[in-house]
Image: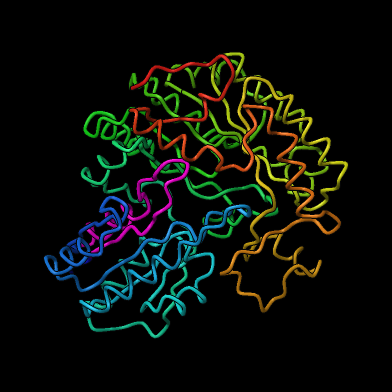
């Protein structure tokens, strides 16, 4: 069958992100013998005219739409993205009889509500490669599934996780717009953070991709696509099993050194591991710190303390590796006292930049969802398509916002609200800066323009 896959993401902050999930589904369909075309809405400047031309040219039997985000999870400057997908589907309906299938992280979080609201034919929850192939095969044989929502069990591992079928034209657009080429090395997450839906979406264990295939992807992105920097998109790069160390060792064997970044769980790293990172080209890391005090970290379900954040930060900054930290105020167990402690802790973090969020977006299938119901913040009847943010009862939202603005404003390395520099980032990208932007906020750090 002819399949057109559409990347529907329109969020550009902090930088536009290549539709990696769509490219993995594309590869699975191609391997199954189907004819696949990829169309990225952002690359086409949100043009319905271009979408019309592509549909009329390819005449697809099935259109798969990848949904990356429901909204921007920013309480102080809310943006919804689902209306864009709804508009895309309505437009496709007006010009084509193709079967429309929704998928991606955003859809998997609220599948029933989104399928109803957007009016597609089918939706796939979780990793969609095998289910999308199975659905298209059934449609080809005129055997339409009775259930409109198909749910995957996270089980793909090693070579069964398909490689991305990177579209070079789409990738060129992202690289030319200040982006970083993204690559996944594993799926799943063993951690149980209160607010996070990763374990539900990808499973509660780490499932690694084949190292040989990862290396081939790295070589393709750097040699063929001329990517100047890579972003490992794993939920957590530094897993306890040491899968990330095996990958770095393989990169050293292959003499691969390319600027890269990743999400890091705060912990102490040995010098040999830091040396491996440096040899392979680490250019900066983003720490999933989240809680700014020990009490807040406990409320968020973290297994570390703030001293571990300091120690981890120092492991990197002592070697000249820039770090970014991300913090959320208002979570479970947050009090006015822990807010004061947290503000002081963040301001005193050395040689780093910190992005600060107020409130936490409540998502189904998380511990925070259960807590919010028990506290009366939401009810089981709330569909959560409209964002609801958790702020611990007893904290005043407006006073918290004023406090955070007042205390962080004098400090260049503390960014609140987290999108406060969005226009500056866009300007830097136009000037030719690529890759990380937050590292320019670290005092005394300079970077040559690319």
Start-end of magenta stretch: 4-32
Residue 301 visible in the displayed image: no
Q: Quadrant of the C terminus?
A: top left
How many labels were placed on the picture? 0
Q: Position of residue 129 (x, y in %)?
A: 36, 60
Whole-percent x, y for residue 181 in the image: 35, 37
**Which quadrant is home to the N terminus?**
bottom left
The color scheme shown is rainbow
Camera-nearest residue between 195 and 341: 341
Q: Position of residue 118 (x, y in %)?
A: 42, 75
Viewer-proximal residue, 421 or 287?
421
Q: Position of residue 262 (x, y in %)?
A: 50, 34
29 relative position to 356: left or right: left
Whether residue 73 is situated above or below residue 103 in the rendered picture: above
Q: Nearer the viewer, residue 388 or 97?
A: 388
**Residue at point 73%, 28% (across, down):** 347
- The residue shown at (39%, 17%) is 448
Would residue 24 be counted in the magenta stretch? yes
- Looking at the image, the residue that sits furthest to the left is 57
For residue 369, above or below residue 17: below
Q: In this view of the protein, can residue 43 be seen by the observer? A: yes
Q: Kindly identify the residue that appears in the image at 64 percent across and 57 percent down.
A: 361
Residue 352 horizontal side relative to residue 445, left or right: right
Residue 10 falls within the magenta-colored stretch: yes
Q: Is residue 181 above or below residue 383?
A: above
Would residue 445 appear left or right of 301 to someone viewing this image? left
Q: Quadrant of residue 412?
A: top right
């Amino acid at each position: 069958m002819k399949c057109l896959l559409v990347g529907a993401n329109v969020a550009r902050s902090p930088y536009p992100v290549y539709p990696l999930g769509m490219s993995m589904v594309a590869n699975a369909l191609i391997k199954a013998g189907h004819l696949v075309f990829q169309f990225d809405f952002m690359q086409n400047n949100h043009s319905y005219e271009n979408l019309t031309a592509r549909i009329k040219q390819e005449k697809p039997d099935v259109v798969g739409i990848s949904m990356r985000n429901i909204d921007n999870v920013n309480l102080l400057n809310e943006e919804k993205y689902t209306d864009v997908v709804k508009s895309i589907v309505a437009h496709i309906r007006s010009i084509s009889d193709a079967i429309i299938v929704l998928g991606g992280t955003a859809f998997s979080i609220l599948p029933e509500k989104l399928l109803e609201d957007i009016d597609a034919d089918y939706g796939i929850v979780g990793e969609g490669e095998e289910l999308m192939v199975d659905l298209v095969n059934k449609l080809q044989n005129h055997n339409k599934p009775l259930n409109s929502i198909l749910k995957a069990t996270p089980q793909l591992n090693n070579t069964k996780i398909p490689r991305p079928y990177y579209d070079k034209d789409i990738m060129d657009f992202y690289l030319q717009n200040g982006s970083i080429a993204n690559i996944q090395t594993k799926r799943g997450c063993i951690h149980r953070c209160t607010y996070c839906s990763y374990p539900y979406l990808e499973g509660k264990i780490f499932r690694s991709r084949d190292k040989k295939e990862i290396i081939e992807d790295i070589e393709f992105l750097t040699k063929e696509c001329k990517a100047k920097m890579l972003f490992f998109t794993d939920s957590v790069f530094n897993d306890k099993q040491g899968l990330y160390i095996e990958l770095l060792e393989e990169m050293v064997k292959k003499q691969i050194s390319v600027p890269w970044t990743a999400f890091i769980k705060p912990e102490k790293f040995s010098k040999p591991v830091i040396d491996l990172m440096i040899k392979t080209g680490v250019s900066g890391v983003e720490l999933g710190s989240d809680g700014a005090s020990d009490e807040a970290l406990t409320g968020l379900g973290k297994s570390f303390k703030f001293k571990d954040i300091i120690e981890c930060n120092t492991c990197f900054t002592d070697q000249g590796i820039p770090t970014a930290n991300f913090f959320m105020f208002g979570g479970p167990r947050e009090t006015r006292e822990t807010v004061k402690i947290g503000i002081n802790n963040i301001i005193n973090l050395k040689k780093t930049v910190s992005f600060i969020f107020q409130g936490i977006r409540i998502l189904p299938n998380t511990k925070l969802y259960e807590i919010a119901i028990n506290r009366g913040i939401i009810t089981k009847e709330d569909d959560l398509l409209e964002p609801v943010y958790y702020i611990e009862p007893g904290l005043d939202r407006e006073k918290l916002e004023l406090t955070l603005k007042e205390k962080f404003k004098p400090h260049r390395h503390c960014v609140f609200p987290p999108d406060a520099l969005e226009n500056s980032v866009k300007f830097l990208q136009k000037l030719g800066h690529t890759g990380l932007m937050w590292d320019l906020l670290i005092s005394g750090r300079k970077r040559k323009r690319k």
